[in-house]
Image (cartoon, helix red, strand yellow):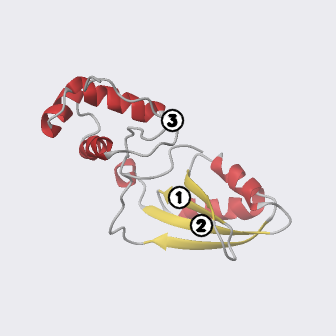
Amino acid sequence: MSEDKPQRRLKGTSLDDIDRRIVEVLTRDGRAQSTTIGEELGLSGNLVSNRIRAMDAAGLMRVVAVADHRIHGYRLVARIRLQVTGRAPIDVAQQLAQREEVLSVHITSGRYPVSCLYAFRNAREMLEAVRQATADIPGVDDVDVELINNVYRYVPTVGPLGS
């Protein structure tokens, strides 16, 4: 079998060593060309290109840009947790996921089954988001807000690729 032919993958198949090395390079520079990646890894550009397409098609990897929220004027990051009664937490989470200002929404265990990560420009925006969560979303009984003061590590290299 030629080196340049990617093996067919089933959706959800795991990455092999070559794939992980390619992803590692793309993590450092998402705009790296296949030929450049190939030179660094001792592979042909065609093999790298085929592997990237195969990983993407199999849902194993996606090249995305991550913007620093501070550059866009967001000074505060907070986690808002919601206690829900009389309604399925998944319904509340799906309603929150429609809001543009919400960065991520999670179903969790414990007293607050819905957790959201937000970025805000100022404290007023944060207070308004809390008010809206309690007033506009049926089933929300209580809200807990955790202001994230410092981020010491954030590694977005592995995560969910879709909803």
Asked if the residue under mark 3 is in contact with the one under mark 2, i.e. CB atoms within 8 Å, the reply is: no
Reading the image, the residue beneath label 1 is 118
* Between discs 3 and 1, the one toward the N terminus: 3
Q: Secondary structure at mark 3?
A: loop
What's the distance in space between the residues labelled 3 and 1, CA to CA? 35 Å
Q: Nearer the viewer, mark 3 or mark 1?
A: 3
Q: Earlier in the sequence, mark 2 or mark 1?
A: 2
Quadrant assignment, res 70: bottom left
Tell me the CA gap for discs 2 and 1. 8 Å
Depth check, mark 2 against mark 3: the one in front is 3
Type of amino acid under label 3 = Leu
Q: What residue appears at the point 53 percent right and 73 percent down from the top-left corner?
A: 146
Badge 3: residue crowd in 10 Å (few <14, some 14–19, many ≥20) = few
Residue 159 or 50: which is nearer the viewer? Answer: 50
Residue beneath disc 3: 10
Residue that sits furthest to the bottom in the current view: 111
Q: Which residue is mark 2?
A: 80
Q: Residue at x 42, y 40 (%)?
A: 61
| Mark toward the start of the polypeptide (2 vs 3) | 3
Percent position of residue 37, x then y: 20, 35
In the figure, 18 relative to 8: above or below? below
Tell whether label 1 touches label 2 (CB within 8 Å). Answer: yes
- The image shows residue 49 at horizontal and vertical percentages of 30, 27
Q: Nearer the viewer, residue 120 or 93?
A: 93
Judging depth in this view, the residue of 87 and 45 nearest the camera is: 45
At a point 36% along the width and 61% down the height, the residue shown is 154
